[in-house]
Image (spheres, helix red, strand yellow):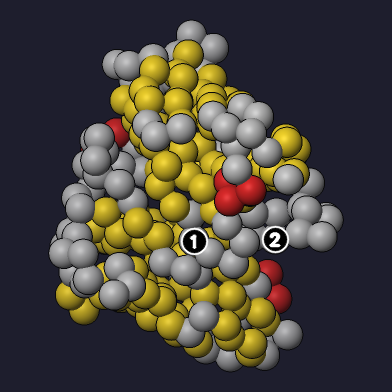
Amino acid sequence: DTAVSQTPKYLVTQMGNDKSIKCEQNLGHDTMYWYKQDSKKFLKIMFSYNNKELIINETVPNRFSPKSPDKAHLNLHINSLELGDSAVYFCASSPRGVAGSGNTRYFGEGSWLTVV
Amino acid sequence: GESVGLHLPTLSVQEGDNSIINCAYSNSASDYFIWYKQESGKGPQFIIDIRSNMDKRQGQRVTVLLNKTVKHLSLQIAATQPGDSAVYFCAENSGGSNYKLTFGKGTLLTVNP
């Protein structure tokens, strides 16, 4: 069983479209995250949710809207896609939202988004 | 190859040698640090972590050293194997109780057989 699963794995779409990436974790974790990894492999946090509540929003354009229907799911919806949105988007989860030994962050396999 | 155009720091070692990957972190208030390994086409995978009240922690074939004075973290991999080839990231919790992990630039480790 995959611990953190994202769909789709690959997405090619045109500028201006709206798209969603879904994420589910079956680990029973309280906290979920979205990260963006650019072409230089730089990983930057976008959002963090703890028990369905937004706790981190890192100056991401409001074209990006996360939605957490329950604590096992955190979806990312992107409106009016731009060329600069092309990246790999990673979902992650951790047992709780507080740092500590053993509170490891588990990542999904990534969703490769290409905007043309 | 994968490294073309990435401009990542790179480290190339022979199989069986020890590897040391270095990381300078930015926030002197960071209290928790993690090393991740990212293989090609996959998500980052936890390797080892360390709290700021420690200066060394050992795992299986890996050791993390923390020097808070100079804000430096290192990952030592003993007897490096071809399966260790990946991009390695250090990450610091700079958000206090909000557990905001900030990732470093990443180092590409290539192990030559």
Amino acid at dot 1: Gly
Up/down of B60 relative to A113, above or below? above
Chain identity of mark 2: A
Instruction: Kindly indicate the quadrant of the structure image that contains residue A30.
Output: bottom left
Chain identity of mark 1: B
Instruction: Kindly indicate the quadrant of the structure image that contains residue A99.
Output: top left
Residue located farthest toward the top when viewing the structure as drawn: B69
Residue drawn at (50%, 69%) of the image:
A110
What residue is disc 2 on?
Answer: A39
Image position of A29 (left or right of A47)? left
Disc 2 vs disc 1: which is toward the camera? 1
Res. B28 visible in picture: yes
Q: Is the residue under label 1 in contact with that under label 2 (CB below 8 Å)?
A: no
Q: Are marks 2 and 1 on the same chain?
A: no
* Quadrant (top left/top right/bottom left/bottom right) for the N terminus of chain B: bottom right
Q: Which mark is residue B99?
A: none
**Which element carries disc 1, helix, strand or loop?**
loop
Image position of A26 (left or right of B46)? left
**Category of crowding for the residue at label 2, using alpha-carbon neighbours closer than 10 angstroms: few (below 14), some (14–19), many (at least 20):** few
Amino acid at dot 2: Ser
Up/down of A56 relative to B32, above or below? below
What residue is disc 1 on?
Answer: B43
Q: Nearer the viewer, residue A66 or B79?
A: B79
Residue drawn at (58%, 91%) of the image:
A17
Q: Position of residue A112 (x, y in %)?
A: 58, 75
Mark-to-mark CA distance, 2 and 1? 14 Å
Residue drawn at (33%, 51%) of the image:
A105
Up/down of A41 relative to A116, above or below? above
